[in-house]
Amino acid sequence: MGVKCKACSAIVLILLLLGSMWLYGSLDHHLGTCLKMYIPKNKAVSLNRVNSSEEGEAPLKVCPGQRFKVANLLAYLKSAPVSTNDVLLKPYLASWDELIKFMEALGPMVGIISQEIESKTTVIRDLAQKHEKEAEKRMKNKKRVTMGRDTGIVIPHKRSSNSSKMNHKLSDSTSGYISIRSMIKWEMKNGLVDFQKYTISGCRTLLRLHRALLWLQSFLQELGKDAPEGGHLGRPSDLCKETYQRTLAKHHTWWVRRAAELAFLAMPERPYFYQLVCVETQEEAAVVLDRVVRAIGEVYERTEVALDEHKMLDLP
């Protein structure tokens, strides 16, 4: 009994350590671990089609009692791209909300890491909310002064010692956190991004999410591939490890890479993933995952171009 307790304590300490490293090292310490767990198999009760006008697209099934819904993920991903080269932040972050549910569905070990991912989406949302409140306050103050001038009366309002500087920052853009490019432009113009040292900014946080998104896209793409002629479908744990090595591993320390590769051994088998996307066969899974991978690819490429144009792919 004493040995078992010590083993359990060691596992808990390792998980807490990995969670801490993830938090303070950002998403570039993404381990992507997975844990086997039992979920009763449910039959689909309804069918939804996202962008059904696209030729050859298969209907997406919705399973009851499941928080993660691939139809919702696809809908958010499809609504994120705007104009020809930008991405709206709200649907982008909503896509991450759904991906977090996907990771949480894989078990408590992944839940620890998904919480750190969620903390990154919270950073951007908090910055956007703060910017919006400051912009609203500035507009109200401007309106008060304008009304006072119209009546010949100047209505004073309190200003903090740095209010002049803040108003100057707000004057250059009222849509700072509407899209990825508007966020980059606003934070660059207002000196919120440091290329030499760590700072809390939407751009730096976006880069960590961006790197994790590439890993998830690569992993889902491999899961959707058919078995080679005369061969067998790859094990999810192997695919997870291989895609990790191609993507996130280069941003991690040696210790984190070794810990990640050990964690992948707990990856569920394929039938579990079929349940998550509400399909029953590899052929059905391939169709659904292909749609998701292509939608992620569109968002990823636009984000990559925007970050690269501003030399932000290596922010500390």
Image (spheres, rainbow, N blue to C red):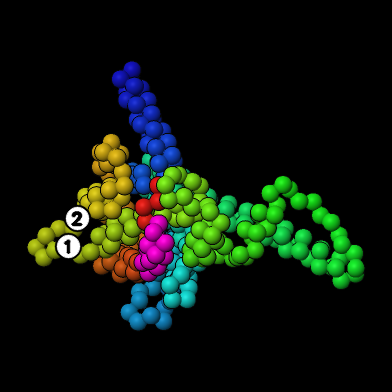
Q: Going by the picture, which residue comes out furthest to the right?
A: 152
Q: Position of residue 222 (x, y in %)?
A: 25, 60
Above-or-below relation of 30 to 294: above
**Residue at image location 43% in from the left, 39% down from the top:** 24
Closer to the camera, 280 or 251?
251
Q: Amino acid at mark 2?
A: Gly
**Residue at image location 42% in from the left, 78% down from the top:** 52
Decide whether the magenta segment is chiefly helix, strand or loop.
Answer: helix
Q: Which residues are magenta?
A: 298-312
Q: Secondary structure at mark 1?
A: loop
Q: Position of residue 53 (x, y in %)?
A: 41, 82
Q: Quadrant of residue 44?
A: bottom left
Q: Is residue 216 left or right of residue 191?
A: left
Q: Amino acid at mark 1?
A: Ala
Along the polypeptide, which appears first: circle 2 or circle 1?
A: 1
**Residue at image location 23% in from the left, 64% down from the top:** 225
Residue 227's tag is 1
Q: Quadrant of residue 271?
A: bottom left
Spatial separation of the CA atoms under disc 2 and disc 1: 7 Å
Above-or-below relation of 154 to 52: above
Q: Secondary structure at mark 2?
A: loop
Residue 234's tag is 2
Q: Quadrant of the N terminus?
A: top left
Give the total of numbered labels.
Answer: 2
User: Is 301 included in the stretch rendered in magenta?
Assistant: yes
Do the residues bearing badges 2 and 1 touch, measured as CB atoms within 8 Å? yes
Above-or-below relation of 88 to 118: below
Is residue 112 in view? no
**Residue at image location 56% in from the left, 56% down from the top:** 190
Closer to the camera, 268 or 293?
293
